[in-house]
Image: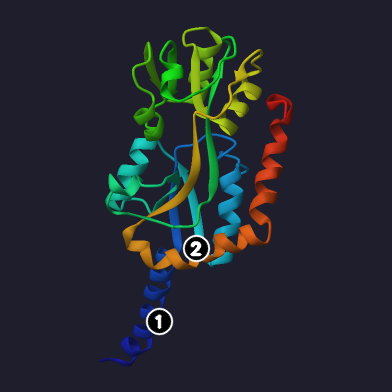
Amino acid sequence: MSMGIKIWLPILLGLMLAGSVHAETTLVLNTPFFAPITSPGRDGVLDLFYAELFKRAGLKLEIQPMSAERSLLNVNSGIDDGDVSRVLGIDKAYPNLVRVPESVMFYQMVVFTRKPRFTVTGADSLKPFDVGILTGWKILERNIVDTRSLLKLETGAQLFSMLDKGRIDVAVIEKLEGLHFIQSLGLKDIKIMEPAFVEGDWFLYLHKKHEALVPRLTEAIRKMKQDGTQKRIFDSVLKRYQAVDGT
């Protein structure tokens, strides 16, 4: 082996290792959500939450928008590294996903309507209505059945436009997103029905190739809850919509 090769070989190996470390610690997470959960301005509640989480965990992060169904398919196949948040048990249908067991967000899927107020008591209470949801939201697709009609739309703007024009009676969407669309579209007289249609915890899911990162991320999420960081982030975003929510 020549002297030149001997000198350059360690340098090349070092560069290769550095590239490998970068690839392992920069995760691409998909998001099917709109503002204020995730947004192009990176000021959504999960944008802010994950920026702090990954900083604490010593990892690099990229969040990219993607449709709900495509996101799951890409993560399950290993094309992308993870999905920002899904319900408990989604890995049963997508077996290559691993769940970070500490939840990242408490969600509320709520009913928005112009109709007279009614009590939301599960799927039966929606049966008399024309209902709209977003395509790919599995928890709503499973739970909303036998309604007069069910329309699946691609964007929240489309969903609330249909509601505003009276083409659907009811829109079911995550509460924060619904408040955002009411505010951003300047809509009036749309009511939030109580209680939530369905609510629970959302979790970060990764492709199984990143399973070794789960304990590190779990501990970092737990500490963010304990020191109040998670609550401060969520409260700061909620304040943007107090006038809309009326709470």
- Relative image position of residue 82 (x, y in whole percent): 40, 52
Occupied quadrant, residue 73: top left
- Relative image position of residue 65 (x, y in whole percent): 46, 40
Q: Is residue 247 above or below residue 9?
A: above
- Relative image position of residue 209 (x, y in whole percent): 32, 62
Colouring method of the image: rainbow
Q: What's the residue at 33%, 92% (across, down)?
A: 3
Which amino acid type is marked by label 1?
Ile
Q: Secondary structure at mark 2?
A: helix
**Disc 2 target residue:** 217
Quick one: 8 or 57, which is closer to the camera?
A: 57
Q: What's the residue at 64%, 15% (across, down)?
A: 187
Numbered marks: total: 2
- Answer left or right for 221 relative to 152: right
Q: Quadrant of the C terminus?
A: top right
Query: Looking at the image, do the residues carrying marks 1 and 2 touch, with CB atoms under 8 Å apart?
Result: no
Residue extending farthest to the top is 166
Cα separation, mark 1 vs mark 2, equals 32 Å
Circle 1 or circle 2, nearest the eye: 2
Q: What's the residue at 61%, 57% (across, down)?
A: 52
**Disc 1 target residue:** 11
- Answer left or right for 1 relative to 185: left
